[in-house]
Amino acid sequence: MSATTAVNKKRKQANSGPVLDWSASHGPVTGALSATTGALAVATTGAATGMPPAWALAVGAAGALGHTVAGLKVRNAGRTLAFKASAWLVGAGWTTWAMTSGPLSWAALGSLATIGVGIGAGTRSVALYEEAREDEAIAAAGRQVALELSAERRAIAAEWVERIQRICSVTVRVLAVELWESANGYSLDLEPQGGVTYDRIAQHGPQLSADAKLPHGCTAALGPGIHQGRAILDVTTVNVLAEPRTYPDDYSPLSVHTGIPWGFRTNGEEVRAYLREQCALVVGPTGSGKTNMLHTILGGFARAEDMLTFVIDLNAGSAGLPWVLPALNGELTGQDGKPVRPGIDWLAGTYEEAMLMLNAAIAIGLHRKRAYQDLMAREDTDLLPVSAKIPQIMLVIDEGAEILVSTDRQLKELAKKIFEFIRMQRAMGGRTVITALGATGSVLGNLLIRREAKVRVALTGGETEGMDLSKMFPGRRGLRVDQAPFKGAGFMGTPESPGALFKAWRIKPSQIRDITVATSDRHPRLDDVSARAAGAAYARRWDAERTAWMRSLPADAGILSDPTAEPGGEGGGLNLSALRGVREPGQAGAAREDELLRRFREEIDAQFATAPDPSASPAASGLNLSALRGEADQDSPAQRAALAALFAAGPDGTGASAIARALADEHGTTRQTVVGWLKAWTEDGTAVRVGEGTKARYVHRDHAPEPPIQS
Ligand SMILES: Nc1ncnc2c1ncn2[C@@H]1O[C@H](COP(=O)(O)OP(=O)(O)OP(=O)(O)O)[C@@H](O)[C@H]1O
């Protein structure tokens, strides 16, 4: 009975005098007391007032009837109804007798006490009986559901035992079948007989899926079970990867220790990356959703209270900019009107800044090793206890794999530092997330990456080229690229969660802003020990001159910091992923939501007529990036930058001093060096020298007034 009903009832009773509450519940003591004291009161007042004894019998009969009707209403058991009715009748019988023979005699009072004890005992047993009856009813309903469920489970078990026998020639026992709460599939706990291991069945994954007629994008994937003699078979029956799901709008705090959610599995469960000791490798060809996934990762790191994210992105910093620019430009306002801190802690978009960053990160690790000896001894650990006070440094390098395998002299320098960071910093709270366009063979050929980067993602988006899933997820058979032909979908494996289908959430630019605002107060500060080691390079990372490039992305920003150009490498020349949209229209350009990158591309498009065919000759396609492609097979990014500056100068041309000035900050190139290059270009026809003496200037051959003149 609810509190209000009870109160109302009380009020009603107070207004209209006592009423008989047939359904009022009594325990064994209060029930007996109420019955016997009631009977005594009726008998004494009845005897004193000369009430006819038959009245008591009538009251008892009415009581018995009333209780039976009330009991029926609440569906009491027959046994309970009979007991309650008889209690009323016994009480009434005693009252009738006591009224005629005198209620206050020892015989009358003694017999009344006996009746009281009897009613008490009876009520207790009836209450227990009611309770048991109720429990039994609930259990019966549960059994019915379980029976239906277990019929379904039994059918599933029988079906798979037969299928595995027929296709893999392996006999299995099914120990349990778990139907997923998401209703997207189920898991079987199997015990292959005769010492057969799970991988014998796993290699037949595709045949098993086909035989089970699973929809596209659904798999029957086998993984190891609780011990070597057991296996878990995960069967997905609904393809949840096809539909886009946006990043959950719960931006609650995370930690390196809680793991960072990177996406969801086919059963709808989120999958987390635990990066305290692991590095991560994310492979995704153009258009597979790699940039989106990177933002999801950066979003997770921004939410963490004990992680500081350093981003290196030599493609004009495009991966990091949405996390920095809105905050840096003051476009965002935090709670209480406070300024908003960027969602990442450091962004390097140029080679020089990346060098500063890596040097600082390495110095931090070395210094931490010495400075935190005592703390680690106290905590009895050989891993630096990462916390909000001593944050983990997550170094995220977009297309870092391409840097690691580059043959370019400068990029090799960077690669050396990245490897040093990976090798030295596990214990000191420094880990990396490296993305790759797909060069899995060359990247995974590196022992250090294989050993340290066990959190792995392969975004396929249906792309089959360069996707060696068996190398990415050794030991996982039956993973096929065509199982995940959707943008943002692919495979993810971690030491905790074996490689299997997954999909990254779609994260919109507005969410990036929301997360930046929501997490602004949460980002840790670099501990003093580390900040001292990192020095001015860290302290002044947001200085206007160091971030100027972010605000005014020059059309040639990507060219100046091309991470993938490998002189002498296959194809040679420019291979800028930031410019990929220019060379491969339709692949990425249209889809990209990053406002700045779009602007950047528009500028490129406006400045250079786009050349869809990379092999088109400069003369045939007009000058554009493809023209630079052949010529830019130069020795260094500085030389390519100089060539870009020459081209950008148009028909007016430029001189060695101006080019040297343009390159000074970025590359430190001297005028003398530029003079040498201009001489060489004039000799091979790339540039034309016009004017004499102080008026002498150089024009790119495509802007030259007359056909190139060989000097
Ligand atoms: N997880 C996802 N869910 C749904 N759609 C997605 C997802 N990830 C990406 N997409 C779609 O794919 C498009 C391309 O994504 P994204 O820019 O991340 O690809 P990319 O691999 O980085 O390509 P590029 O290297 O050319 O920039 C997005 O604009 C979006 O429409």
Image (tube, grey):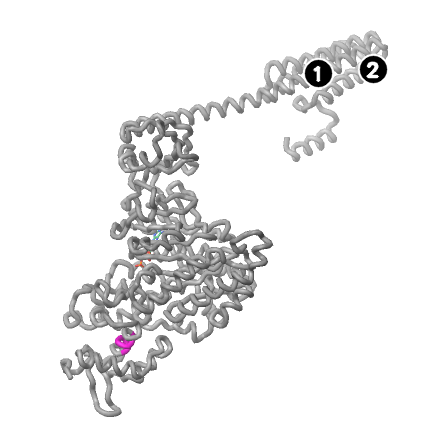
Q: Nearer the viewer, residue 386 or 113?
A: 386
Residue drawn at x 33%, y 57% is 436
- Type of amino acid at the residue the image marks with label 1: Ala
> On the rendered structure, is 75 left or right of 281?
right
Q: Position of residue 138 (x, y in %)?
A: 53, 24
Residue at (72% x, 17% y) in the render: 120
Q: Residues within 10 Å of mark 2 (few under 14, many from 20)?
A: some
Q: Report which residue position mark 1 lands on.
A: 121
Left or right: where 662 falls relative to 36: left
* Overall secondary structure of the magenta section: helix
Please state if 551 lies on the left or on the right of 143 as rendered: left
Horizontal and vertical percent position of residue 173: 38, 26
Q: Secondary structure at mark 1?
A: helix
How many numbered badges does the structure rendering display?
Answer: 2
Is residue 98 visible to the viewer in this orientation of the structure?
yes
509 in the magenta segment: no
- Mark 2, residue position: 44
The dot on residue 310 is none
Magenta stretch, residue numbers? 641-645
Q: Quadrant of the C terminus?
A: bottom left
Q: Nearer the viewer, residue 22 or 617?
A: 617
Single out the mark in the foreground, 1 or 2. 1
Point out the image quarter for the N terminus: top right
